[in-house]
Image (cartoon, rainbow, N blue to C red):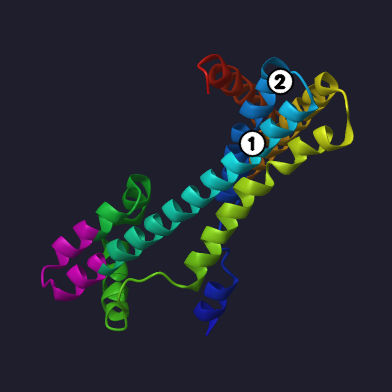
Amino acid sequence: MANTDDAKCARVLDPVERVTEVIFGLLMAMTFTGTISVATGGQEEERTMMIAALGCNLAWGLADAVMYLLRSLVEHSRKRTLLASLRDGSDPAAGRALIAQALPGRLVAAAGTEELEALRQRLIRHAATAVQPRLGWDDFKGAVGVFLLVVLSTFPLVVPFLLLDQTALAVRLSNLIGLLVLFIAGWVLAKYAGGKPWQGALTTATTGAALIAAIIALGG
């Protein structure tokens, strides 16, 4: 029962996935807003650019959601294959080797032979109840979450253009908001990783600004 409750409480998207999806959508939108002051000459053209930014993030959000489902299906299939191999294999050493291949190297080194063998035996017992690999409700919730994160990350950048008539001022404010969100995203990632939040925030904001400048310079 405890394992079932833990599974229900597990997050569909972990903090890294959520923050990186926001960063991705933000960078996509900022490449549009960064070109507005150069590419537009009036309110109508500005509106067209913003609609294009929203449309681009809608398209990429959909593509990213589909890729999330594909990754999930591949992972389910890998787990199914591993369990089947452990269940059908008779050589304990070969089974431990399969588990070692599926785990990070440092974790394998720390676990040792006895822990790997205990894990192999537990997985064999679990393999008897394994189901066919298929996409579940959590996978689709994760895909919807990815889509919404990519798309909604555009809106903070659009707000200045909705409230201000001066395009140049709106562009500067929009870029400032974008850098602020990148700063916050870097702070969250660094804190989650156990690093220095200020360092992570500054690095993410600086790297994001450099990427946007490079994308714009390359015609993106």
Q: Residue 33: in sight, yes or no?
A: yes
Q: Is residue 86 magenta?
A: yes
Q: Quadrant of residue 87?
A: bottom left
149 relative to 78, above or below: above
Q: What is the spatial separation of the Cα atoms under label 1 and label 2, in whole angstroms?
A: 14 Å
Q: Looking at numbered disc 1 in the image, what kind of residue is underneath it?
A: Ala
The chief SS type of the magenta part is: helix
Label 2: how many Cα within 10 Å (few below 14, some 14–19, many 20+)? some
User: The magenta stretch spans which residues?
Assistant: 81-98
166 relative to 21, above or below: above
30 relative to 55, above or below: above
Residue topped by disc 2: 40
Q: Is residue 134 left or right of residue 124?
A: right
Q: Residue at x 60, y 71 (%)?
A: 9
Question: Considering only order in the chain, which callout, 2 or 1, is on the residue closer to the N terminus?
Answer: 2
Label 1: how many Cα within 10 Å (few below 14, some 14–19, many 20+)? many
Residue topped by disc 1: 53
Q: What is the residue that sits farthest to the left in this orientation? A: 90
Q: How many marks?
A: 2
Q: Which mark is residue 121?
A: none
Secondary structure beneath dot 2 equals loop
Q: Looking at numbered disc 2 in the image, what kind of residue is underneath it?
A: Thr
Q: Residue at x 76, y 40 (%)?
A: 156
Q: Quadrant of residue 91?
A: bottom left
Q: Quadrant of residue 179?
A: top right
Between tags 1 and 2, which lies in front? 2
